[in-house]
Image: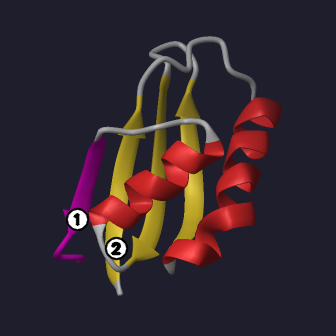
Amino acid sequence: MARYVDVHHGFEGVTAEQLAEAHQADLDIEGAEGVHFESAWLDPELGKVFCLSTGPSKEAIMRVHEKAGHPVTEVYELTAEV
């Protein structure tokens, strides 16, 4: 499985609890696409959320986020790690 990081915009003022709820929404439906969301990080001042996941394709990542109610357009495959 490939690893991905994606970037959400428009999350200004979101709390850690709200981030946890959004992450849980992904976890609740990720299996249908063969995706697993490992972690999510929040910068509430910039309004950005970053998610780390594994899955079969960036399109699968995007479909899960769309169905969970927080679509994303920036998804990057991580091809090297040190």
**5 to 10, vertically: above or below:** below
Instruction: In this rendered view, identify the residue nearer to me: 21 or 32.
Output: 32
Quick check: 52 above or below 57? Answer: above
Residue of label 1: 77
Task: Say above or below: 4 vs 67.
Answer: below
Left or right, residue 57 beside residue 8: left
Quadrant of the frame with the C terminus: bottom left
Q: Quadrant of residue 13?
A: top right
For image coordinates 46% across by 37% down, the residue present is 71
Which kind of residue does numbered mark 2 sit on? Arg
Give residue 12's position: percent from left, percent from top. Answer: 56, 13
Does the residue at mark 2 contact the one at mark 1 (Cβ under 8 Å)?
Answer: yes
Label 2, residues with CA under 10 Å away: few <14, some 14-19, many ≥20: many
| Residue 75 included in the magenta stretch of the image | yes
**Residue reaching furthest left?**
79
Dividing the picture into quarters, in which one does residue 63 lie? bottom left
Colouring: secondary structure
Under tag 2, what secondary structure?
strand
Sequence order check: which comes first, mark 2 or mark 1? 2
Disc 1 marks a residue whose amino acid type is Glu
Query: Marks 2 and 1, how far apart in space?
Result: 6 Å
Q: Nearer the viewer, residue 2 or 64?
A: 64
Residue 81 in magenta? yes
Horizontal side, residue 10 vs residue 79: left or right: right
Question: Helix, strand, or loop for circle 1?
Answer: strand
Q: Residue 27 in the image: state x and y as whole percent.
A: 69, 63
Q: Which residue is drawn at the image coordinates 28% and 51% (left, top)? A: 75
**Residue on which the image places disc 2:** 3
Q: What span is in magenta?
A: 74-82
Q: As displayed, is residue 47 above or below residue 6? A: above
